[in-house]
Image: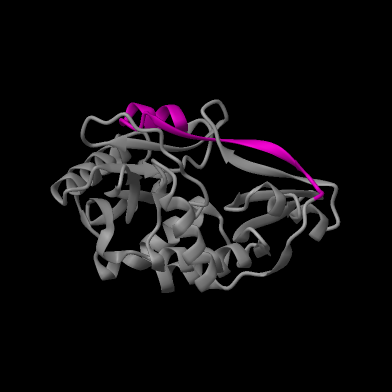
C-alpha cells in the first residue's frame, strides 16, 4: 500500500470512482475532468497497484488581517466501497495535511457532503466550523438587474470576499469554473446596479422557492431580487455563528479564526 500523486494512467479509474460516489451527472463530470481536475494536486492511495481512495486539493486563500493565508480546499474525497472502514481516507487526509504544511500552507478546508460525515471529519482535525443561516428577504427595493458576466462575477466576488475576515477564496480559474457550473445547474448569476453602486447575486429556484445563495448587495439592492423573479421574498444565506454547518477547517498551526465558506464547488 502506498500514497502519492495520481498517475496519468490512473485518471480513468479515478473518474469512475468520482462518478459513482457523487452522482453529479455526465455534463458536470466531463467539464470537471476536462477543465478543472487538478492532476498535480490529486493524491491516491493504492493497494496492490489499484486505486482505493482519492482526494484533490485546490489551492485557496483565507483573508486574515491585511493579507491572506495560503491553504487547500479538499474536494472529491472518496473511497471505493470495497475498501472502506480500513482507515484509508484518514491516511490520505493526514498525507494532504503534511504536504500542505511542507508547502507553507496554514489550513485545509472541506464541505462535508452528508451530515453524518461532520463528526468523521472532526476526528481528523477539521474542528473549525463555517456556518450559514437563511434569512427572509422581503421584496421591495429597486435596482437595475441584468445577467452578470464571468469577468464581472469573478471580480466582484473577490472584492466581496476580500472584505470578510476568514473568507476562503478560490483561485481565479476556479471562480470561472464555478461560474459555469452555477449556470449549468440552472442557477442565475445577476448584476445589480443603482445609485449606491453595483453588486452580484447567485440565485436558485428550488421546489418553487427562491434562494439567494450569496450576494454582495446591500439591503436595497438585495430586496429588489424577489420582485425580479415575481416573488414576494427569498431566502438568503449569510454567515452565522449559530446556523447550519456548511464547511469545516483544519488549521495546521495554532489559530483562532471564524471562517466564512460558501459556494465552494459543492
Q: To which quarter of the image does residue 65 belong?
A: top left
Q: Is residue 191 visible?
A: yes
Q: Is residue 247 left or right of residue 210?
A: left
The number of numbered discs placed on residues in the rendered structure image is 0
What segment is highlighted magenta in the picture? 118-140
Residue 8: horizontal and vertical position, in percent? 27, 70
Identify the residue at the far front of this view.
Answer: 195
Q: What is the image's colouring?
A: one colour
Q: Nearer the viewer, residue 230 or 88?
A: 230
Give the answer, above or below, for where 74 lies relative to 201: above
Residue 130 inside the magenta-drawn segment:
yes
Instruction: Please tell me which residue is depicted at 17% across the width and 44% down the height of the picture.
Output: 101
Towards the viewer: 248 or 218: 218
In the rendered image, residue 248 lying in the magenta stretch gets the answer no
How far from the left and from the top, in percent, is residue 79? 38, 46
The quarter of the picture where residue 193 lies is bottom right
> Which residue is at the front of the view, 141 or 33?
141
100 vs 146, left or right, is left
Q: Residue at x 41, y 52 (%)?
A: 162
Closer to the camera in the image, 223 or 122: 223
Q: Position of residue 161 (x, y in %)?
A: 45, 51
Is residue 53 something that shows in the picture? Answer: no
Q: Left or right: where does residue 243 sit relative to residue 211?
A: left
Query: What residue is at 33 percent from the left and 52 percent from the top?
Result: 61
Q: Position of residue 145 (x, y in %)?
A: 72, 66
Amino acid at each position: 500500500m502506498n500514497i502519492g500523486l495520481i498517475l496519468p494512467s490512473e485518471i480513468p479509474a479515478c473518474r469512475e470512482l468520482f462518478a459513482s460516489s457523487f452522482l453529479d451527472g455526465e455534463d458536470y463530470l466531463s467539464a470537471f475532468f476536462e477543465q478543472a481536475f487538478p492532476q498535480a494536486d490529486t493524491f491516491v492511495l493504492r493497494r496492490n497497484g489499484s486505486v482505493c481512495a482519492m482526494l484533490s486539493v485546490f489551492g485557496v486563500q483565507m483573508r486574515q488581517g491585511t493579507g491572506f493565508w495560503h491553504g487547500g480546499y479538499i474536494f472529491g474525497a472518496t473511497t471505493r466501497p470495497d475498501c472502506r472502514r480500513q482507515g484509508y481516507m484518514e491516511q490520505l487526509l493526514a498525507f494532504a495535511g503534511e504536504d500542505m504544511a511542507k508547502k507553507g500552507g496554514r489550513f485545509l478546508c472541506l464541505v462535508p457532503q452528508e451530515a453524518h460525515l461532520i463528526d468523521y471529519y472532526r476526528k481528523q482535525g477539521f474542528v473549525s466550523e463555517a456556518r450559514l443561516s437563511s434569512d427572509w428577504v422581503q421584496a421591495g427595493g429597486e435596482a437595475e438587474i441584468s445577467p452578470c458576466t464571468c469577468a464581472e462575477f469573478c471580480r466582484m466576488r473577490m472584492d466581496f470576499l476580500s472584505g470578510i475576515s476568514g473568507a476562503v477564496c478560490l483561485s481565479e480559474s476556479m471562480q470561472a469554473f464555478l461560474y459555469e457550473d452555477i449556470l449549468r445547474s440552472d442557477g442565475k448569476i445577476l448584476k445589480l446596479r443603482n445609485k449606491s453602486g453595483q453588486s452580484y447575486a447567485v440565485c436558485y429556484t428550488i421546489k418553487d422557492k427562491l434562494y439567494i445563495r450569496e450576494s454582495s448587495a446591500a439591503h436595497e439592492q438585495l430586496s429588489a431580487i424577489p420582485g425580479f423573479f415575481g416573488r414576494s421574498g427569498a431566502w438568503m444565506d449569510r454567515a452565522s455563528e449559530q446556523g447550519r454547518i456548511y464547511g469545516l477547517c483544519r488549521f495546521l498551526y495554532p489559530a483562532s479564526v471564524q471562517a466564512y465558506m460558501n459556494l465552494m464547488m459543492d
